[in-house]
Amino acid sequence: MVAASNSGLDRHPAWYFNVRADPELTVERGGETYRAVASELTGPERDTWYARLTEADPAFTTYETRTTRRIPVFRLVRTTGA
């Protein structure tokens, strides 16, 4: 899961628009690189996962208080190993 928080600014980060235009992407995480497909979560599913993000990193709670926009959350599903 990734959130387009943009540190709580009132605009989505640039990558948000890129992922919406083309959800097939390359993920680089902890020295590992793989292909994935992103899908934006909505409704209660989005809320559940955003709450989990705030539990893992309390900064996400702060981001929510800085903006009136609803911070998007994306599920990334791995499609290949590299």
Image: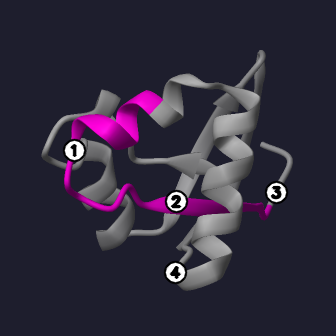
Tell me, yes or no, whether the two marked residues, 2 and 3, touch with CB atoms within 8 Å: no
> In this view of the protein, can residue 12 be seen by the observer?
yes
Given the current orientation, which residue lies at the most extreme right position?
A: 81
Q: Give 3 or 79, whichever is nearer the viewer.
A: 3
> Comparing marks 4 and 3, which lies closer to the viewer?
4
Residue most extreme to the front: 65
Q: Residue at x 63, y 80 (%)?
A: 44
Per the image, the residue denoted by label 2 is: 73
Up-down: is 26 above or below 36?
A: above
CA gap between label 4 and label 3 equals: 25 Å
Amino acid type for the residue under numbered disc 4: Thr
| Occupied quadrant, residue 13 | top left
User: Label 4, on which residue?
Assistant: 42
For label 4, count other residues whose C-alpha is less than 10 Å away and answer few (under 14), some (14-19) or many (20+). few
- Other-residue count near label 1 (Cα within 10 Å), few / some / many at <14 / 14–19 / ≥20: some
As for residue 72 lying within the magenta part, the answer is yes
Q: Quickly name the residue at label 3.
A: 80
Q: Which mark is residue 54?
A: none
Residue visible at 42% across and 60% down in the picture: 72
**Which residue is at the front of the view, 50 or 78?**
50
Circle 1 is placed at which residue position?
67
Cα separation, mark 2 vs mark 4, equals 8 Å
Residue 24, position as x, y percentages in the image: 53, 65
Q: Position of residue 57 (x, y in %)?
A: 66, 25
- 23 part of magenta stretch: no
Q: Which residues are magenta?
A: 62-79
Q: Mark 1 or mark 2, which is nearer the start of the sequence?
A: 1
